[in-house]
Each structure stands twice: as structure tokens, then as C-alpha cells.
Image (spheres, rainbow, N blue to C red):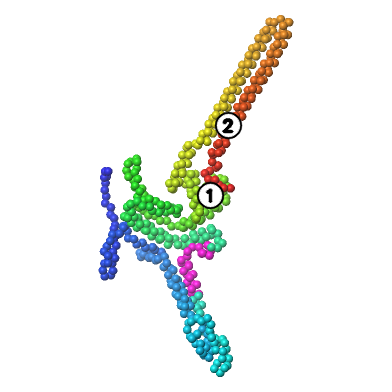
Amino acid sequence: MQKIAERKVKRRRVYKSIITSSCILKDRELIAGEHLPIIPVYGEWGFAGDKEVYEGVVRLTKDGQRLRNMIMSFNADIVARTPKKKPFFWPEQIAGYEYMYSGQDDFPYYLLNRTDENGGDIPPQPLGYMDNPEVPQANAYMLEAATNAVKEVATLGVDTEAAGGNVAFDTVNQLNMRADLETYVFQDNLATAMRRDGEVYAAMVNDLYDVSRTVLMTLPDGSEKDVQLLTQVVDYQTGEVVTLNDIRGRYETYTDTGPSFQSMKSQNRAEILDLLGKVPQGTPEFQMLLLQYFTLLDGKGVEIMREYANKQLVLMGLKQPESEEELQALMQAQQQQGQPDAAMIQAQGVLLQGQADLQRAQNDQAKIQVEAFKAQTDAQVSAARVVEILASADSTKKQDVIAALKLLGDFQTKQGDSARADAELVLKGQDQIHSRRMDLTNLLRQANQPSGGAAEIPQ
């Protein structure tokens, strides 16, 4: 290794101490990272002239919440201090039974005197009851006003009653988007704080992580997977040791604000489901939308469908492989496409043999035609000789010669017809054999050809 250049890099160090107003309890101690692990989060932040002005996220809700807490405490105190409903009696009615009415004991029954000391009848019911203190009506009005004031500045998006009622999915999304616009400033400041969290964490990891370990990484689509950090492998081309997933260094951190992953997934599912009703079934577009819908399913028992859809999208070339299993499946599919199977090779052999038989039959037909032409030529030559013989023969022998030639001509005609029929039978047999082999080849091709795509659509 040859050193080309060098430079000095300034780095900050953070020390921690525990002190009081009078002494130092613990001297300074070096901690990981080069940033103070204190991240402020602003609700509203800006400048009024040359003065920095900021407030917290719950600053505007404090007054209304305090008023609401005061009213609730006042009403709770009234309810807690309210005694049981107490009756009024004449002393003669409960004489001798004062212990039942003096304490807070709850007896199964209470006794009264029927007569007084003179023997007169005493009414068996109390004279009246003590009224309980009531909650002032102004408290109820102020409690409602304070609750509404808190909700106006601390909205959480769609009302729970509206979200749980018969409200369209698009309407709920629009209300959520409107609520996001109202809280955009808060979300932007929160994103700034989260970015600072990432910077502090990255600096700490640079000092702490020095051995290989498995961490959980969140992908951009919200899914999670395990990744091995600081894994060392040998590069066979250069012979050097290379560290994979090396996080020891300086990195930039980025944040993004937006709707939650579950909200986006639900919205995408609804849009794809709407498109599935408009796209004709059996088309490549319908198959692609169906597989994409399977990948967005979540819950218990849908892992098989999600994995199958991801694998098929990778094999179709619509998605990049993200795991080793998907990469191996893609390589295996490519190898299978490059190497035809035994059935396809057999079908090709049958096809070539059928073509050879057809060529042989065509050659035989041409040979028969040549022989027929030769025979016809010989017949014409023989006829010319016969004419010559007849011209030179006597008149008495001409009739015998003509009769013999007529018999010979009939024999040659029958022999030519028989040869022609035999040739047609041979050609017809060869054509039937070739047709059977072509049918067998087509059947083998159909058995090995996929039916329209990588995934079957149940009908």
C-alpha cells in the first residue's frame, strides 16, 4: 500500500459530568458520538424581526386543557363530598334506634317506633330528606366549551365517529389530507428533529459498532428485514478483504414526512381493487394488478400469497429481487429457459423425423414420375417402330400386327394404371404417418408451453 496524501480532520468529543450547585458529583466522562444527545422539538418556530420566537406543540392547548381540568376537578369534588340522601325524623320515631342512623353503617333494615310514650301512633315514614348539592349548569357549559377549544387546536384528523360510520373511503382520505395540511408546520419541525436524531445516532454507531452483528432494517416500502453489518469477504479478483455493510464513516441523514405506511397501503389496495373491476380478466394487465394486490395484503395467514406474488413479479421482470431466495429463483428460471427439457427435445426429434419422411416421400413421387415419363417415351418409340414395321409389312400381315399391337397397348395401359395406383397408395400412407407425427409434436408442445403467464388465475 502506498500513501498518496494525508489531511487533518477535526472531530468533536462529548463528555458527561454530574454536578450540583455546590460540587461535582461525577467528573467528566467520554461518551460515544460527537454531538450532544439533546434534540429540541419545536411546534412553531420563526423570527419576529431579529428575535427568535418559538413554542411547543401543545402550547396552544394548555389554556383550554387547564380550564377543562379545573372544571372536572370541581365536579369530582362535588360528587365525592355529597353524602348519602339523609331523612328527617322526630326524636320519638327513632328513640332507642339512634345507632342505626348516626353512623355510616349500612344495615340490612332499619327500625322505627310505632307509638310514642303516650301510646299515640307515629307515622312510619320520614318527615323529609336533605337535598344533595347539584352541579352548577355553568360548569356543564364551560366544560363543553373547554373541550371544543382543545379539539380545535389539537385535531387528530378524521373524527372517530365519522371513521367508524358509513363514510366513503375517499372521503376519509380527503379529510386526513386536510388535517395533514393543518399540521404541516408541526410535521416539518418534527422531521427536522428526527433528522438530528439520525445524525446523533450515526455518530454513536461509528464509535460503538466494531464487530459483525445483525440489525433490523426498515425498507422504503415499510417492510423489515435482517441485515448483517461489518461482514468481511474476500474479493477473488483483487485478493483483498472487503467489508460489506460498513457503517463506520460519515453519512448524511434524510427524513420525509407524509401519511403513515398503513394508510398508504390501504389506499393503494382500494385503488388496485377498483382497477381490477375495470380491466378484463385473462390479460397480462389483470394478472399484474392481481399479483400487486396480493403483495399489499397483511395480517395472519396471507404470508403464502404475499411470497408467491413477490416471486411471480420477479420472474415476470416487473420487480427487482430483494432477497436471496428471489434471486435464486430468478437464476433458476433463466437456466431452465436456456436448457430445453427432455420432452421438448423428443418433440423436436419427432418433428425432424417427420420432415425427413416427407422429403423421402416427395423423392419417391419424383422418381415415379421420372419412370412414368421414361415409360411413356419408350411407348412412343415403340409406336414409331410399329408404324415403320407396318409401312414395310405386307397387306396380309397388317391385320395380324394391328391386332397384336392393340392387345399390347391394352396391357401397357392396365400396367400403367396399376403402377399409378400403387404410387398413390404409397404417398397416402406416407402422408398419414407424417400427420400422426405432427399431431404428436403439437401435443408435446402444448403440454410444455405455459398457459399465458407465470401465475394461474382461478376462474
Q: Is residue 104 magenta?
A: no
In terms of depth relative to the viewer, which is nearer, 410 or 174?
410
Number of other residues with Cα within 10 Å of mark 2, as a class: few under 14, some 14 to 19, many 20 or more:
some
Could you say which disc has been placed on residue 155 in the image? none
Does residue 285 appear in the picture of this structure?
no
In terms of depth relative to the viewer, which is nearer, 249 or 301?
301
Q: Residue at x 72, y 6 (%)?
A: 397
Q: As displayed, is residue 66 above or below residue 333?
A: below
Label located before the other in sequence (2 or 1): 1
Q: Main secondary structure of the magenta part?
A: helix
Q: Is residue 145 magenta?
A: yes
Q: Residue at x 50, y 48 (%)?
A: 309
Residue identified by numbered label 2? 437
Range of the magenta residues?
141-163
Q: Residue at x 48, y 37 (%)?
A: 339
Residue 149 coordinates in the image, percent (x, y): 47, 70
Residue 164 coordinates in the image, percent (x, y): 53, 63
Q: Nearer the viewer, mark 2 or mark 1?
A: 2
Q: As displayed, is residue 135 above or below residue 261?
A: below
What is the three-letter code of the residue carrying label 2? Arg
Residue identified by numbered label 1? 290
What is the three-letter code of the residue carrying label 1? Leu
Relative horizontal placement of residue 295, taking residue 31 as reference (left or right): right
In the rendered image, the quadrant that contains the N terminus is top left
Number of other residues with Cα within 10 Å of mark 1, as a class: few under 14, some 14 to 19, many 20 or more:
some
Indicate the secondary structure of the residue bearing disc 2: helix
Q: Residue at x 48, y 82 (%)?
A: 104
Q: As displayed, is residue 16 above or below residue 339?
A: below
